[in-house]
Image (tube, rainbow, N blue to C red):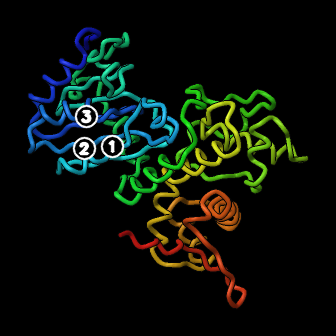
Amino acid sequence: MRLEWARLGDQLLEACADCRDEAILVAPFMKAESLRRFFANLPSSVAVTCITRWRLEEFALGVSDLDCWKRVSERGNSKLMLLSNLHTKYFRFDDTVYIGSANLTMAALGWSRTSNVEALVRFSSGSEHSSAALESVLLSRSVEASQELFEQFESMLLSMPVASRFKPEPQTIEALDTSSIGGGVQAVWFPRFRSPEVLFRIYSGVADVTSVDALRDAIGDLSYFEIPAALNELEFRDLIRSRLAAAEALVRLDRFLTERRRFGEVRSWLRNEFQVKDSTSAWQTLMRWLLYFLPDRYEAETPNYSEIFGRKPRPARF
């Protein structure tokens, strides 16, 4: 095991050139130019998996590029996976592993005039420092990006407010102890707060609920999303929309909703797919969130007392 801190980007490019079978690139922030350099040095026969997160405000701030999707889809033999609460920076080229502080950006890898001070630990995955368990968690928790999801984010990014209002620090809420909200890392997020229409008022510091349990649920949802501070209501709703669109459960549900589904069908699917115990309550809550934050994408109707839920027809593109 060796600590590396100098010429990180160049070292990783050398590892790319030596790679023969598989490369895994994991970073919350990815820039298209950095990814282009990696791909230029990786043999075309190498299978590449990129794992990152998509957050609307991070694209607006320029710390990550939505166009990384185009780089991956154009390369072939590659896929882009999304993990909403990703913070790990991890790179594996066959048996050589780097893990540490550096994102896949020009500044982090020493390729910009104002580069960061970063460090990566290098080791062999075949040694006692195996990273197989970490990779298993990352891959099992991620969902694969798609052209349709890319177009959703591209549309949201084009219509969002001026990016200068956004701040990179996540919102911290200290009004209520949230230590009992979850037991460790939450594998798959589902909303627990049942009144999404008042979520912004709670975010703004106006406790608009009388139940302590409801307030705790709202704070738990906000904490999971890591929303930046001091947003106005329009900005807040835009970011919640983008978080929902890329959340693991929502990406998988959206694919299930390629045809319209009855309430019982979705409830059973949630129970079987995610082992949700109270799938009735979970689907009722999730449906409220989708109809409130994504009304342009989803709709519900109740013919013959049976609720039908599905995607709205997509407008024709010319």
* Label number found at residue 293: none
Which callout, 3 or 2, points at the residue further toward the start of the chain? 3
Q: For this rendering, which residue is in front, 152 or 88?
A: 152
Q: Are marks 3 and 2 in contact (CB under 8 Å)?
A: yes
Tell me the CA gap for discs 1 and 2.
Answer: 7 Å
Q: Are marks 1 and 2 in contact (CB under 8 Å)?
A: yes
Give, as a three-letter code, the residue at label 3.
Leu
- Residue at 74%, 44% in the rendered image: 200
x, y percent for residue 142: 41, 47
- Residue at 68%, 88% in the rendered image: 303
Give, as a three-letter code, the residue at label 2.
Arg
145 left or right of 165 in image: left
Q: Which residue is mark 3?
A: 35
Residue lying at the far bottom in this picture: please name it.
Answer: 304
Q: Quadrant of residue 35?
A: top left
- Residue at 55%, 27% in the rendered image: 168
The answer to whether residue 278 is seen in the rendering is no
* Label number found at residue 67: 1
- Residue at 25%, 16% in the rendered image: 8
Give, as a three-letter code, the residue at label 1.
Asp
How many marks on residues? 3
Q: At numbered mark 2, what does the secondary structure look like: helix, strand or loop?
A: helix
Task: Identify the image quadrant of the N terminus.
Answer: top left
Q: Which residue is mark 2?
A: 71
Q: At numbered mark 3, what does the secondary structure look like: helix, strand or loop?
A: helix
